[in-house]
């Protein structure tokens, strides 16, 4: 295919392609371009469009891009899919070669590439080399998942060296701002207004012109019934985390095989159902009853899953033969998943005060979380006690960040002796 010229390159009029709210973001060329935003704020789609369009500009013909998430396996269904969408949105499908093994995109006219890496394999990130041109751009999606600023610094330092005239190095970070204590706030949002190397912006669903009435109703309902969540998930403000339900937890890269070889551990698997607005969430843990420790080693966390897909995912993760305790509110779903090969799934036993009793039991354990369990880390770091209308904490957790938290309670049911409490 011949090199794409300015005459053949797709014509882009930004308001028609992505709408308003991102003009400054689109044009910024400083080192750090950071966007926190609510759900449906277009931040990921805008970033994907920007990357594809930039790489097809003749003046950037030597530029390559690295796309990063904390865990590599989450890239295919997020950034990779968004970038494929952007290519099609720009009418440029014939100009790109898209590979899934390994994840990679190549711009045919110039050989420029988009590489995909996870911070769970730091050697592959820090040792990346490009075939043609230079590596000068990096997109970190769901940057909130990166809990250690040192991990970001390692990545920041890996893109180094001179670039040709006209090119520039840039990190684009996109995320939902769940916790005001996250290092991202102090690093990029506090006191950086006059820093020419930093653009830190907040966007929300109100700049997304393509939401329909049903989409908008979700946010209006949230605003009415859950104003605290609306301030974050609706308006993109920083989440205020006060009064965690579980405080005795830490993130640690452990080897499950080593743990199993060293000590006796019992398995614990729990499943919470979701579909349209909430994810289906599978908790996979090992329990050391003597040392009172829970090791969280894997998770499933995805919206829009049919029961067949849930069963397929559980089987693909290698857990089809495990005893899984699921939310008893959906007996038909449990029966269907059982018929699809997950034979040991069973309903949880719910009873009076089950949530509080379950929480109190788990609070007696230290919870150690593998870094790959990014959704579990997000939930447990934001699962707090609710407040009354006067702002006083009450003896009930918030009805949010609770999908894996509920799945963990279901999983731990089997370890409570003599039915001291039930679900």
Image (cartoon, rainbow, N blue to C red):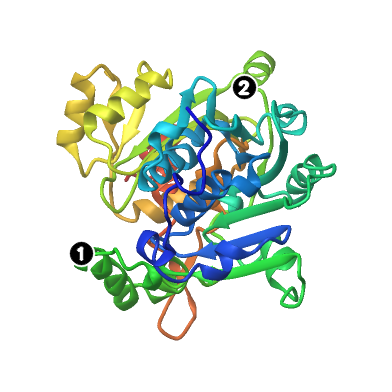
> Residue at the top extreme?
261
Q: Residue at x 70, y 53 (%)?
A: 170
- The quarter of the displayed image where residue 314 is located: top left
Residue 240 percent across, percent down from the top left: 56, 71
Q: In percent of the image, x 34 and y 76: which residue is there?
A: 223
Q: Which residue is mark 2?
A: 256
**Image quadrant in which the C terminus is located:** top left
- Contact between labelled residues 1 and 2, with CB atoms less than 8 Å apart: no
Secondary structure type for disc 1:
helix
On the question of residue 252 being in view, the answer is yes
Q: In the rendered view, would you say 148 is above or below 326? A: below
Residue at the (60%, 46%) spot, across then down: 58
Q: Position of residue 218 (x, y in %)?
A: 27, 66
Q: Is residue 203 above or below residue 150?
A: below
* Residue sitting nearer the eye, 169 or 265: 169
**Dot 2, how many residues are within 10 Å of its Cα: few (below 14), some (14-19), or many (20+)?**
some
Q: Position of residue 154 (x, y in %)?
A: 79, 42
Q: Which is nearer the eye, 305 or 286?
A: 305
Disc 1: CA contacts within 10 A as few (<14), some (14-19) or many (>=20): few
Residue 417 in sight in this render: no
Q: Which residue is mark 1?
A: 214
Name the residue furthest left: 332
Q: Residue furthest front?
A: 7
Mark 2 or mark 1, earlier in chain: 1
The numbered mark at residue 247 is none
- Tell me where residue 303 sits by quadrant: top left
Mark nearer the viewer, 2 or 1: 1
Q: Which sits in the foreground, 59 or 168?
A: 59
């Amino acid at each position: 295919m011949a090199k794409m010229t300015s005459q053949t390159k797709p014509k882009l009029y930004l308001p028609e392609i992505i709408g308003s709210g991102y003009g400054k973001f689109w044009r910024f060329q400083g080192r750090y371009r950071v966007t926190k935003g609510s759900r449906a704020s277009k931040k990921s789609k805008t970033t994907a469009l920007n990357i594809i369009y930039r790489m097809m500009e003749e003046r950037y013909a030597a530029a390559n891009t690295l796309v990063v998430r904390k865990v590599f396996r989450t890239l295919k269904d997020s950034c990779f899919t968004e970038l494929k969408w952007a290519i099609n949105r720009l009418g440029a499908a014939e100009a790109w070669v898209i590979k899934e093994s390994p994840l990679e995109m190549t711009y045919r006219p110039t050989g420029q590439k988009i590489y995909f890496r996870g911070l769970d394999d730091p050697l592959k990130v820090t040792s990346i080399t490009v075939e043609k041109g230079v590596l000068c751009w990096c997109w970190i999606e769901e940057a909130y998942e990166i809990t250690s600023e040192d991990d970001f610094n390692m990545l920041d330092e890996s893109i180094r060296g001179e670039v040709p005239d006209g090119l520039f190095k840039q990190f684009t970070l996109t995320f939902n701002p769940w916790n005001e204590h996250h290092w991202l706030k102090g690093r990029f949002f506090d006191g950086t207004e006059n820093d020419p190397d930093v653009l830190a912006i907040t966007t929300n669903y109100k700049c997304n012109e393509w939401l329909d009435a049903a989409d908008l109703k979700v946010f209006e309902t949230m605003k009415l019934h859950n104003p605290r969540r609306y301030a974050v998930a609706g308006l993109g403000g920083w989440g205020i985390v006060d009064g965690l339900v579980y405080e005795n937890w830490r993130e640690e890269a452990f080897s499950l095989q080593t743990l199993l070889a060293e000590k006796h551990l019992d398995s614990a698997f729990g499943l919470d159902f979701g579909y349209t607005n909430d994810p289906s969430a599978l908790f996979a843990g090992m329990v050391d009853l003597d040392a009172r420790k829970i090791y969280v080693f894997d998770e499933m966390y995805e919206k829009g899953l049919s029961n067949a897909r849930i069963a397929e995912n559980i089987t693909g993760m290698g857990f089809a033969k495990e005893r899984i305790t699921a939310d008893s509110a959906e007996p038909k779903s449990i029966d269907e998943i059982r018929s699809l090969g997950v034979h040991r799934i069973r309903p949880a036993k719910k009873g009076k005060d089950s949530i509080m009793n379950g929480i109190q039991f788990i609070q007696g354990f230290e919870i150690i979380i593998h870094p790959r369990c990014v959704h579990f880390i997000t939930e447990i770091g934001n699962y707090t006690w609710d407040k009354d209308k006067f702002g006083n904490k009450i003896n009930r957790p918030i009805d949010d960040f609770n999908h894996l938290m509920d799945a963990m309670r279901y999983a731990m049911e089997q370890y409570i002796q003599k039915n001291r409490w039930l679900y």
